[in-house]
Image (cartoon, helix red, strand yellow):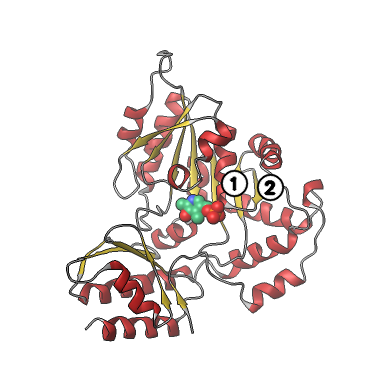
Amino acid sequence: MEINLISDTVTKPTPEMLKAMMIAQVGDDVFKTDPTVTALEEKVASLFGMEAALFFPSGTMANQTAIKLHTQPGEQLICDTYTHVYNYEGGGASFNSGVSCKLVEGTRGMMTANQVEAAINPPDFYHSPLTSLVSIENTTNKGGGACWDLEELRKIRWVCSSHNLAFHLDGARLWNALIAQKESPLEYGKIFDTISVCLSKGLGCPVGSLLVGNKDDMVKAIRIRKIFGGGMRQAGFLAAAGIYALDHHRERLKEDHRRAKEIGEVLGELTFVDYIAPIETNIIIFGIDERKMGVPQFIQKLSEKNILLMGMGKEKLRIVTHLDYTENSHEVFLTELRSLFK
Ligand SMILES: *Cc1c(COP(=O)(O)O)cnc(C)c1O
């Protein structure tokens, strides 16, 4: 049995999800005639109390579409140094939208409203790029699955409104934050202009993300998605997986979070583990003392037992729990951790 802790994207559809996919009614979503895609979009829009949603093949494309929607070439967006839109989307903000990123050094991927306000370029100072968008991420990926404080987000909303900036949420793992913080998606719908959410991470779908926002923006987003090559035809088979996952795989994220905390406790017992970042959701980031144990050696020892995890550069490692990391996998992993590194 392989235990893959590299990412929550490695999950495969469950038999029940596959069944829901197999019996889905489909049409041609580029002509907007796929009833299952439409049902998924309506379901997600209403979860957030927003007007409309649009189905995308990836979270990257949903974020890139949002950036394109809210900016003009030459302008600037504000984001934390840790954000996915800056680090892991292949430079898409500049390639697709011709915008630059003003980076803010937050804490575990989270900026304060004061930092955001200080990063805005004065609109009448034509030497600097015009600031038009603020983009944040919840949970933060590079920040180790940290969850934002809703109050701070409301303050940033206020800053955005008073400076005429759009506010986008990269919610690839927002489902994790909602469960961990016991929050309602409706609260998020009130704060942001657009929100992207992934179905293919904690929720366990094979493919898919959605962008949520107002009707006008989502009509414009259809055109941008087309330009990016993201129009999909009988996408209802994929949307059916999303509907199934929203109904059956959200509450269970608590299990991923509990297991992540328990892994953290066992890591804490290992003498060569230097630090463990606070564990709030399903991501564990920790560092090991390389004088006692090398990162490649640690990864190798586990991989000999069919347990996979990822280095994050230097002394840092990452573990991500997910739907296919079962209670049984959990027991095996904790036992191996204890016995391999006694
Ligand atoms: C995974 C992820 C995305 C989108 O990734 P895709 O692989 O393109 O679906 C966006 N933002 C964050 C924070 C992510 O972790």
Asked if the beta carbon under badge 1 is closer than 8 A to the nearest atom of ligand 1, the reply is: yes
Tell me if residue 10 comes above or below residue 115 in the rendering: below
Which residue appears at 71% of the width and 71% of the height? Answer: 20
Tell me if residue 272 comes above or below residue 106 in the rendering: below
Dot 2 corresponds to which residue?
A: 230
Is there any visible trace of residue 68 in the rendered image?
Answer: yes
Q: Are marks 2 and 1 in contact (CB under 8 Å)?
A: yes
Could you tell me residue 320's position as x and y percent? 41, 67
Task: In the rendered structure, find residue 237 and report the number of the disc placed on it.
Answer: none
Task: In the rendered structure, find residue 61 and report the number of the disc placed on it.
Answer: 1
Which residue appears at 50% of the width and 30% of the height? Answer: 99
Quote the CA–CA distance across marks 2 and 1: 8 Å
Could you tell me residue 97's position as x and y percent? 56, 32
* Left or right: 16 as drawn, with respect to 322: right
* Left or right: 63 as drawn, with respect to 37: left
Tell me if residue 126 comes above or below residue 222 in the rendering: above
